[in-house]
Amino acid sequence: MSKETAFEAAYKLLNRSIIRYQGEPIGTVAAIQSSSLVAVNYAECFVRDFVPSAFVFLMQGETDIVRNFLKTVLTLSAQQPVMRGHDRAMGLMPASFKVVKDIDNNDRIVADFGERAIGRVAPVDSAMWWMILLRVYVVTTGDQALAHSPEFQQGMRQILQLYLKESFETSPAMLVPDGSFMIDRRMGVAGHPLEIQSLFYGMLHAAQDLLIANKENETLLATAKYRMQTLLSYVRFYYWLDIKRLNEIHRFGSEEFGPDAKNLHNIYPETIPDWIDGWLPEGMGYFIGNLGPGRMDFRLFSSGNLLAVMFGLATEDQAEQIMQLYDHHWDDLIGNMPLKLVYPALTGKEWSMMTGCDPKNVAWSYHNGGNWPMLIWMFAGAAIRSGRDDLAKKAVSQAMQRLHQDEWAEYYDGKHGDLIGRRANLNQVWSATSLIVANDLIESPNSMVLSESLIFY
C-alpha cells in the first residue's frame, strides 16, 4: 500500500465526518461506522477529538470550520444544564455536541457536559483544549479580532476564574476526579493526573497571548502567570523520575514533619512497584502519572509526557531523556501500533480495585495499556522538538502500514498493540487526522501551523 493511498483515505474520512449546522461546517463526528456496536455518542463532535481535525483544516487553509467550532463551543458553554440539582460554574465547556432536528425540522445543537458520560463526570479538559486550539487558530490565521471580541474575552475570563479558583489545595497542580479527561472511566487517575497538569500549563500559557492586557484582565493575567510559573517548577521537580530520583525515593524517611522534611508528600518507599526495578536506565526519565499526599503513581502516561515536551513544561534535558526512554523501550511503549496510552497495565487484584472490575479496561486494552494511534501527533511533535526526527519518522511509517488496512481503528489491544481493540470503533476520525498531522510535522516542520503554534512555546 502506497503512502499516497493511505493519506488519500485519511482525508476522505475527514471530509465525510464533517458536521453542519444550518448549512455551515462546525465540527467532525468522532467515528463513522454503520455497525450497531458503535457507541451512540461517537456520532457527536468531541472537543478533544476535534483538535487534530482542526490542525488538518488549518494546514489546508480551511479556517471557517475551525472558527465556527470555536464559536459554537463558546456559545454552548453558557447552556449548561442543572446536574442533580447542582448549578455548575460558568467557564466549563462541553465534552461533545451534536446537531439534531426539532419538531419543525430545524437544526438544534445539543451539548453534553457530562450528563450522558459513563461516570456523569464534568469534562475538565475541554476548556483547556478549546483555549489551546484558539491560540493555534489565531497564530495560524492572524485573526486576533476573534480572540479580542467581547464574547471571547468574557469566555476566557470565565474559564480562568473557574480553573484558578482558590481551594483548600496547597499544590499548584489541579485536582480532578476520575473520568474528567480522555481517560473517562475509573482508572485510578483521580487527584493530580499529569495530562491535566500539562494541559493546564498549556492553557495558562495560551491565556497570556489571548487575553488583552487591560485593566479588566490585569489581576487575572497576573494570577495566571504566577500559577503557571509555580506549576512549572513543581512538575519539573516533584513529578520527574530518573534513576537518581528513584534512589532518593527508595531511601525516603516517612512521617516527616516541619520545614526540613524531604519527603513532602509522605511517600512510603514500599510503594515503589517491582516492575520499575531495572526498567529505568541511567540517563533516561519521565514524568510520573500522578502525585498527592501519600501517593505516587509510577505509571507512564504518554499524553501527559508528550504534551509536557511540546508545551515546554519539560526542560530540554528532561525532554531528551523522555524521548530516549521511548527509543530504549520501543517494544513496551510504542509496540507494533504507536503508542501505549499507559504503561504498564493494571492487572489482577490491582485492576479489580482500581477500575471497579471494568470489563472494557482489562489488562492491555482500551485505556488500561491499550495502544492509541491518535497519540502519534503528540509523539511526532515531542520527538521533533527534542531533535529526534528519526523516532517520529519511524512511528509514522509503522502506523501508516496498518491504520488504513485496519480501517482507522480507534485503539489496539495487547502488550505490543498487535490486536485491533475488542470494542474499538472503526473509521475513528482522530486516528486518521493524527497520522496526517504527524506526517506534516515531519514533512513541513517550518510551516506556520506547526512551528509557531502546534509545537508550543
Image (tube, rainbow, N blue to C red):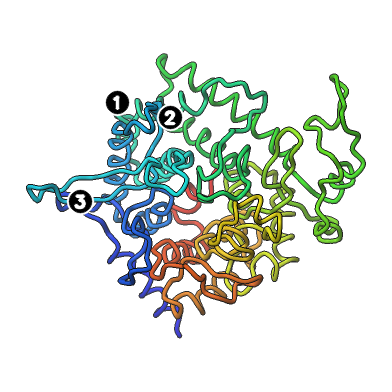
What is the CA distance from the residue labelled 1 to the residue labelled 3? 29 Å
Q: Dot 1: what SS?
A: helix
Whether the residues at callouts 3 and 2 have beta carbons within 8 Å, the answer is no
Q: Residue at x 63, y 44 (%)?
A: 194
The amino acid sitting under disc 3 is Val
Nearest the eye: 411 or 440: 411
Q: Residue at x 58, y 67 (%)?
A: 338
Q: Looking at the image, is 424 positioned above or below residue 90?
A: below
The first of marks 2 and 1 along the sequence is 1
Tell me the residue that label 1 is attached to: 150
Q: Dot 3: what SS?
A: strand
What is the CA distance from the residue labelled 3 to the residue labelled 2? 27 Å
Q: Residue at x 30, y 43 (%)?
A: 111
Report the quarter where the N terminus lies: bottom left
The first of marks 3 and 2 along the sequence is 3
The amino acid sitting under disc 2 is Ile
Tell me the residue that label 3 is attached to: 100
Nearest the eye: 402 or 113: 113
Q: How many marks?
A: 3
Tell me the residue that label 2 is attached to: 159
Q: Dot 2: what SS?
A: helix
Whether the residues at callouts 2 and 1 have beta carbons within 8 Å, the answer is no
The first of marks 1 and 3 along the sequence is 3
Q: Looking at the image, is 401 positioned above or below residue 133?
A: below
The amino acid sitting under disc 1 is Pro
Q: Quadrant of residue 94?
A: top left
Frontmost of labels 2 and 1 is 2
Q: Looking at the image, is 417 positioned above or below residue 103?
A: below
> Can you give x and y, in whole percent of width and height, for residue 131 in the image?
43, 38
- Whether residue 54 sits left or right of residue 205 in the image: it is left
